Structure formats: C-alpha cells, structure tokens
Amino acid sequence: MVDSAAKKSLVGVIGAGTMGAGIAQLAVQAGHPVAVYDAVEGAAARAVEGIGKRLDSLAAKGRITAEEAQAAKDRLGAVAALDALKDAGLVVEAVIEDLGVKQKLFAELEGVVGEDCLLATNTSSLSISAIAGALREPHRLVGMHFFNPAPLMPLVEIIDGLATDPGLSAAVADLAEAWGKTTVRCRSTPGFIVNRVARPFYAEALRAYEEQAADFATIDAVLRESGGFKMGPFELMDMIGLDVNLAVSTSVWEATGYDPRYTPAWTQKEHVAARQLGRKTGRGFYEYGEGVDKPAPRYEDDREPAQAKPALHRCEGRTATSYGDGRILMDLAIDPGGTATVALAPAADTPNVKLEAAIAHLQSRGKKVLVVEDVPGMIVTRTVARLVNEAVDALYRGDAEEEDIDTAMKLGVNYPKGPLEWGADLGFAYILQVLDNLEDIYRDGRYRASPLLRQLAHADGLMDTPLIHTIGSEFIADLEAAFDRIQDQHTEDQRKNDQHANDQHANDLRTKDQHDHDPDKDQP
C-alpha cells in the first residue's frame, strides 16, 4: 500500500503534450503537488493552463467542488529546468517515442533526483530494458503506460524491464491504484499487452479493405454492430492519428524481427505519406469538417418477406466459393440472436434468389444486413481469430498472466470480451480451424497459430466443463488436468497397441506351429 507520505510527494511529469498533461491532471487530482517540464519553451505553462481550465470545467459540472479545483491548481506548476524535480518522489516521462531521446533524458534525470525517486516511462511500445540501459542503476526504471485520456481511461500497464526491481514496480502499481486505476503487470515485450494483442484489429480491417471486401464504413459497421466493438478500426485509427497508429505497428513489427503478423499495411502508409492523418488534419480514412457527412455503411435495402429460409453457414476461414455448393457464409457475431447487424458473403455460384431469400429472412427478424465480398475469413471472424491467437501467444511466452491479458484488452481498448474468454467461448478448436484455413490460403506466416493454441484446441474436448467457465484462477489448473488426461490416454492407447501387437505375435506363432505340424502341408 502507498503511505500518506508517498501520496503527498512531488510528482514530476516530463512532456507537456496530451498524455503528459493528462497524467499531471490525474496526479494533482489525487492530492500530489505536480511539476510539469517540457524542453519546448512555453509548452509546460500552456499545459498547466489547460489543466486549470479542465479542473474549472469539472467544478462547473459538479464533478468536483470549486474548492477542490482551486486546491488542485495551487498544487500544480510549470518548471523551466529538470533541476526543479530534484525532490520528486516519482517522475513520469511522456515525451516523443524515440529511444535515443528517452535514454538521454533518463541519464540526465538520474543525476538530478534522489536515490528514492521512482522513475517511470509512459512509452507505449519501446523496450523498457533498452531505455534503462542508459542508466547507471537500470533497476530504477519501470514502465507506467497510461491510456489516452489518462484522467478517464481506467487501465495502467506496469512493465518490468530485465533489470527492474520488483519492489519498485510494485510500488508504482500501488501508487497507480491509489489514483483509482486498474493495473496489469507484464514484462518488457514489443507492444506490451494492449498494443501487441490489438494489432490484428487494425491489420485485418486494412487487409479486408485492400482485398475489396467492403469500404471503410461497411467494415467499421460489421465490427462494431456484429462484432460488438465500441468503435470500428478505421474510425478509431482516425481518432488516434494514423501516424501514431502506424508508428506503433512499425515499432512492434521491427522489434519482433519483421514478423509477418505485424507487417504494416500499404493503405495506412499511403495515407500517412499524404498527411491524411485523421481527425487532427481533417481527413484520414474519413473526411471531417463542418457540413461533411460521414459515409454510410452499405446496408441492404428492405426486401419483401420470403417463404424460403435458406441455410447460412458459419465462416471457418475459407471462402464461400471454395466449398463449391453455392453456400452463403455468415460472419461471426458476438451475440447471434441479439446483434443488430449480420454480414453475409455469398459464393460466386450462389443463386441470386437464394441470397435474396436470406436477406429477406434476416430482415424479417429485425436484422440489418451487410453483404460483403467473398474474402477468406470475412471480417469479424478473421479479426477475432487473430486477437485470440495473439492473446494465447502472450500467455505462451509468459508476457503476462491470463487474467491481466483479458483485463487489459477490456479496459485498455474497450473490447466486448477478453480475447482468452472469447476464444474459450467460441472454442479454441474453432479458432485454430479458422487460422489454419487462412494460413493455408495465404501461406505468408501471418496466420500461424501459437503452439499453445494447438494445445488448447486439443484440450477443448477433454475438459469436464466448457472452457468459458474456467478462464481465470482455475484455467491453468483445469488445462493441466486436461493435459494429464491426454497423457493418460496416450499411455493407455500405447498399452493397448502393445497388447494388440503381443497378441498378434502370439497368434502368428500358433499359426506357424500348426502349419509346421500339418501332415498335409507339403501335398499339392
């Protein structure tokens, strides 16, 4: 727990951008005196002024009292030099995502602050171990990754580098929780939990667009209204900033040795090169500005009720056309009965009357229908399969615990389910089937399944209860029990095979003995 002295200690925030200002506001509202520093002249003062206005706005809305707002403003100030942070109990760095810049800053800061000062970096994807490598005492540095806007988003990732003192990272986690945040712990791995596991959400939407599955608005609608995500990937990238999102994708791709699972999409790179960065520039995947209407998804027009009720098939990673029977595939829905929108993909040889009947039937049940091109894995199916695989692989690598992985994705990016929970719900065998089918089609390594996913898929049918009920503290115990049953079954099968071989050998000997003693065996 954080004692009262720690709660009253000075918090230094280096970097006066949106994230730095948000962290400073969070700390000052938690009762700390806060000093904001930025190398750009005037930036810290502007950040402090902006925080003051937000505090006044909170008071005007009744979220805090006027006295609380004023007291917080009295504890907040801008400083012109790092030396002003010499008495800080915690310094959080939130400057540009550049390894050299961060290393130089912390090397200088180490000579300013006291030995008991906690040093934290808010990097979203750079190696904590690499940043700490510039310190004389690298054990002092811990990752403290907030999400934007920091005062509102509930999650903080606490990241240990190779040298991080576990006691110090625990102290930083306690402090974040005292500020009202939920913390998750992970080791320093490219992208940590959220930015690593979330990459397929953007990448698969971009690939689907490049394969002409649908336009931006339709893909967003499918993932939002059928998949259950709060925002579609294209509208979310526009809000984040395409340049920021691309930088994270590129960082993870490079840090993983150019793993094809994280290869940046040319569509996003083209938009960034054209300075179409999203809302902040007035144009990204969508156009913004006064009088500009956002494109609508391509919902099917209302059809007359149909007598027929054509069969719809679950997407399993293949195209509808590949089956050769004119089938219609339905994309994955988080709640097939309750979701408002259904996405369909007809095969090249699907009779039009069959597609029309399917659309009419779904509309008669109150569903909006989106028809997309017949691409492998459709939209939600390929996205969720890859999200589950990334989460399972993080567990396989020991990056974080299963509960922290699911918590991070639900709180950090507002996913409707944790990906491990989602995989258990759908069945890991189904997720593996989708990925293997996609990998068989593309053969580029992008859809290769984690070794642990293969184990989970094999264990799926061996659980006493569905995996959905065992995610959490009982998950690994049940999984180990399942693997024990696999081994026991293997041993029993081997015993039976050996017994069968012995019995067969004995029968062969008896037959040979009878043949050797048959008086007629040499007769023609």
Image (cartoon, rainbow, N blue to C red):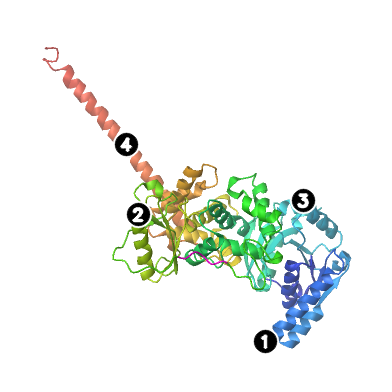
Percent x, y for residue 10?
80, 72
Determine whether label 2 and label 3 are within 8 Å by CB. Answer: no
Mark 2 is surrounded, within 10 Å at the Cα level, by few (under 14), some (14 to 19) or many (20 or more) other residues, namely few
Q: Amino acid at mark 3?
A: Gly
Query: Does the rendering let one see residue 190?
Result: no
Q: Nearer the viewer, mark 4 or mark 3?
A: 3
Label for residue 62?
A: 1
**Structural distance between the alpha carbons of marks 4 and 2:** 51 Å
**Measured along the vertical axis of the image, is residue 486 above or below residue 75?**
above
Mark 2: secondary structure: loop
At a point 45% along the width and 54% down the height, the residue shown is: 479
Question: Label 2 sits on what residue type?
Answer: Pro
Frontmost residue, 77 versus 514: 77
Q: Position of residue 33 (x, y in %)?
A: 79, 75
> What residue is pinned by disc 3?
133
Mark found first going from the N terminus, 4 or 2: 2
Amino acid marked by disc 4 = Asn
Disc 2 and disc 3: Cα gap in Å?
63 Å
